[in-house]
Amino acid sequence: MRVCILEEFTRLGGGQIYALQLANALTRLGHEVEFVIAGEPRVGINYPSRVVPVGFRASYDPYSLLTNYINFRKLGRLVGGYVGDCDLVINNHPNFIPHNKGPIILHGLSFVDFVIDEYGNIRNKPLFWVLSRIYKIYDGAYMVYNSRYTMNLAKKLLPKMGIEPNHEYILSPHYTISTDKVPEKEDYVLTVGRLEWNKGLRALRTIAKQINRKFIIIGRTDAKESREVIRALGTERNIEIIPNADEKTKEEYYKHASAYLHLKRNEHFGIAVLDAIATATIPITPKTGGPWTDILEEGKYGLGYNTIEEIPKLIENAEKLIDREKVHKSKERYNLQNFTNKVKKLMETVNHE
């Protein structure tokens, strides 16, 4: 089967990594895969691709809604001309690329992310109503959720948006780094992610002052505020920032970190947290979001916190509070073979629709 995946590659975030994992699995299963990319890509991929010319970037702020809506409709018409010869179209970026003829993959409830909190409570009802009208095109879609957390948000909010899926399926990504056994650990805490404030990094200055432990932050600098983040956090004596590290460097830091600290409260899944588990690095996450519900299984395979004030004690006592070996073995829930099997089952259900 010829499968086209809709995506944008202005950066390589969790959603794009997921799209590439999906493409790899489909290829292993014998399908022909091509990407239909909205906008000029800034990331190279080893797959055939077609680029849909897009003269705008989605702003995701209340003041750009009208402009976004006009561009959204225009892009929808453009995309239709690029997927006519595809047997199946999978939309991995539905909040930006309007297309509802095939599985729609949700990474969180991205349609309304900026007007809801981490529990799915609506913070701006008028804007929520407007967004609901824009995304009503997904009523009756085959929804694929990247986590149970995303599914729970969808079940709470999609009915309020007038969207009723005709089928639902959970397909979480697999880890990207792993070790066969528990490596030798060193006394530092690791954090990985884009260097931007919405990753919760402001709190790290407060935490670092309260504990005599080294913190290493590995992150991409593709956000406008990355330089500001580096300047602000770089003033702390026990925070080291490694911008734009290559995969080999990142893997080495994962292997030897004692603990992994995640600070974003509304993370939809969290591949970075999963990679911590797969390298026997004890994860510490908020008691919200996909890392807590899906990866840590609410404390079974890692430590959780409600407030920033709890973090220093959790770091200091991590080894006493949870078994590192047990954490490491739990990675098999998210191995490559399980992911491929789930993609195979997805394709079987899609073909029967």
Image: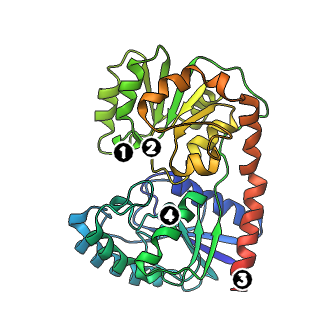
Could you tell me if residue 150 is visible in this image? yes
Distance of mark 1 from mark 2, alpha carbons? 7 Å
Where is 20 relative to 53, above or below?
A: above
First in sequence: mark 3 or mark 1?
1
Q: Secondary structure at mark 4?
A: helix
Question: Which amino acid type is marked by label 1?
Answer: Asn
First in sequence: mark 3 or mark 4?
4
Q: Quadrant location of residue 54?
A: bottom left
Question: Which amino acid type is marked by label 4?
Answer: Leu
Distance of mark 4 from mark 1, alpha carbons? 20 Å
Badge 4: few (under 14), some or many (20 or more) residues near its Cα, within 10 Å? many
- Where does label 1 land, which residue? 198
Distance of mark 3 from mark 4, alpha carbons? 27 Å
Q: Are dots 1 and 2 in contact, CB under 8 Å?
A: yes
First in sequence: mark 2 or mark 3?
2
Distance of mark 2 from mark 4, alpha carbons? 17 Å
- Where does label 4 land, which residue? 153
- Where does label 2 land, which residue? 264
* Picture coordinates of residue 197, whole percent (x, y): 34, 41
Q: Secondary structure at mark 3?
A: helix
Quadrant in which the N terminus is drawn = bottom right
Number of the front mark, 3 or 1? 1
Number of the front mark, 4 or 1? 4
Q: In this rendering, would 222 be left or right of 90? A: left
Quadrant in which the C terminus is drawn = bottom right
Badge 3: few (under 14), some or many (20 or more) residues near its Cα, within 10 Å? few
Where is 325 relative to 290, above or below?
A: above
Q: Nearer the viewer, residue 205 or 299?
A: 299
